[in-house]
């Protein structure tokens, strides 16, 4: 492992340190700060020549700063003659605009892919993309892992009876079906209409949910408005209590307030792909670590081993 280097910016240094602990190595020292006028300053403080370098940097809030840190880190390392550069993006920002669904809008997920590739990344390691087709936006290898095993193990340990797994929309049906199989639970779908990027209206619930305990699975929770609306509608249809399993906790605006005030919602389980601060402030939010998952993926990539077992 002496040829393996883990570097991080300011997006989620605690996750990077935890990954290093699982790998039994030290975090490579790097200065990621600011010049007096606010421009990002980067200096890699250790030799990385000939090394297999992994940059752990989710492009979460503040998205623009963290994304620019990633690009500049890639450029700095590329000029230090490494063997390979892998951008580890536990959370891939700008992913929600992945297609041109309206006139005169960008496809930012593709733009971000172009910029990361142009900066000099050799490959990408990411988790629970908003849309799987984003893998095809890159002209370099992409390893896409999932938090489903981490989430499922937690819910299995809770021994919840009469479970039904609920997909928030038709697009999430494949993932919801995978959760239902692992948890030996039923399956239901929320039919909703999106009025804006932040507002949706629940139209129908497809599936048997009466008298059940529901787990709503999704990749992102931002303002939590659509999450809470779906769960409240499930309550009207006879659901006894509800949980949410969400890969990325953006939690913007009044998200925490909405979660706290939703009586039927017992717990929102989120990974630490995005730093969430002090979880004690909201007892309904449970944070699970994805450091073991990413550490195993990094180790297998470094050793040129298959990581397909982590895709399940």
Image (spheres, rainbow, N blue to C red):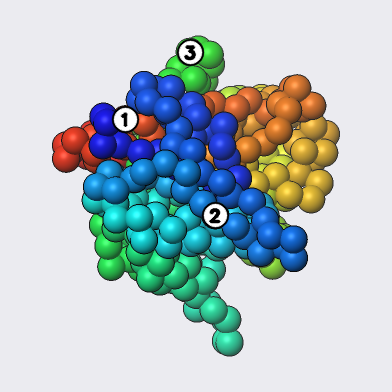
Q: Nearer the viewer, residue 181 or 281?
A: 281
Residue underneath mark 1: 296
Q: Check if mark 2's residue and mark 3's residue have beta carbons within 8 Å.
A: no
Q: Nearer the viewer, residue 126 or 181?
A: 126
Where's the C terminus, which quadrant?
top left
Q: Which one is in front in this view, the residue at disc 2 or the one at disc 3?
A: 2
**The furthest residue to the left:** 305
Q: In terms of sequence position, does the residue under pointer 2 or pointer 1 come before the other? A: 2
Q: CA distance from mark 2 to mark 1?
A: 28 Å
In the drawing, does residue 239 fall left or right of residue 225? left
Q: CA distance from mark 3 to mark 1?
A: 22 Å
90 lies above or below 153: below
Residue at the (56%, 46%) spot, across then down:
31
Q: Which one is in front in this view, the residue at disc 2 or the one at disc 1?
A: 2
Residue underneath mark 3: 157
Label 2 residue SS: strand
Residue at the (82%, 38%) spot, across then down:
257
Q: Is residue 131 visible?
A: no
Q: Which one is in front in this view, the residue at disc 3 or the one at disc 1?
A: 1
Residue underneath mark 2: 42
In the drawing, does residue 101 fall left or right of residue 132? right
Label 1 residue SS: helix
Residue at the (49%, 35%) spot, across then down:
16
């Amino acid at each position: 492992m002496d040829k393996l280097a883990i570097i991080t910016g300011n997006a989620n240094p605690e996750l990077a340190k935890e990954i290093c602990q699982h790998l039994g190595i030290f975090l490579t020292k790097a200065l990621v700060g600011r010049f007096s006028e606010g421009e990002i300053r980067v200096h890699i403080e250790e030799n990385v020549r000939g090394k297999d370098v992994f940059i752990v940097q989710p492009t979460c809030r503040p998205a623009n700063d963290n994304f620019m840190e990633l690009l500049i880190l890639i450029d700095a390392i590329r000029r230090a003659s490494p063997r390979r550069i892998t951008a580890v993006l536990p959370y891939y920002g700008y992913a929600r605009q992945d297609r041109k669904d309206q006139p005169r809008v960008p496809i930012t997920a593709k733009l971000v892919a172009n910029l990361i590739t142009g900066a000099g990344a050799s490959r990408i390691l990411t988790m629970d993309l908003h849309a799987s087709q984003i893998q095809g936006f890159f002209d370099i290898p992409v390893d896409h892992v999932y938090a489903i095993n981490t989430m499922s193990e937690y819910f299995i340990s809770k021994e919840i009876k009469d479970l039904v797994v609920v997909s928030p929309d038709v697009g999430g049906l494949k993932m919801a079906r995978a959760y239902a199989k692992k948890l030996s639970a039923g399956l239901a779908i929320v039919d909703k209409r999106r009025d804006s990027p932040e507002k949706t209206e629940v139209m129908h619930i497809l599936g048997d949910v009466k008298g059940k305990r529901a787990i709503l699975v999704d990749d992102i929770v931002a303002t939590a408005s659509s999450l809470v609306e779906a769960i409240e509608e499930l309550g009207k249809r006879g659901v006894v209590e509800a949980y949410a399993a969400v890969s990325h906790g953006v939690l913007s605006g009044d998200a925490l307030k909405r979660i706290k005030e939703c009586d039927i919602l017992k717990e929102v389980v989120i990974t630490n792909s995005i730093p969430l601060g002090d979880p004690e402030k909201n007892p309904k939010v449970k944070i699970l670590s994805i450091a073991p998952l990413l550490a195993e993926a990094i180790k297998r990539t470094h050793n040129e081993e298959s990581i397909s077992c982590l895709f399940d």
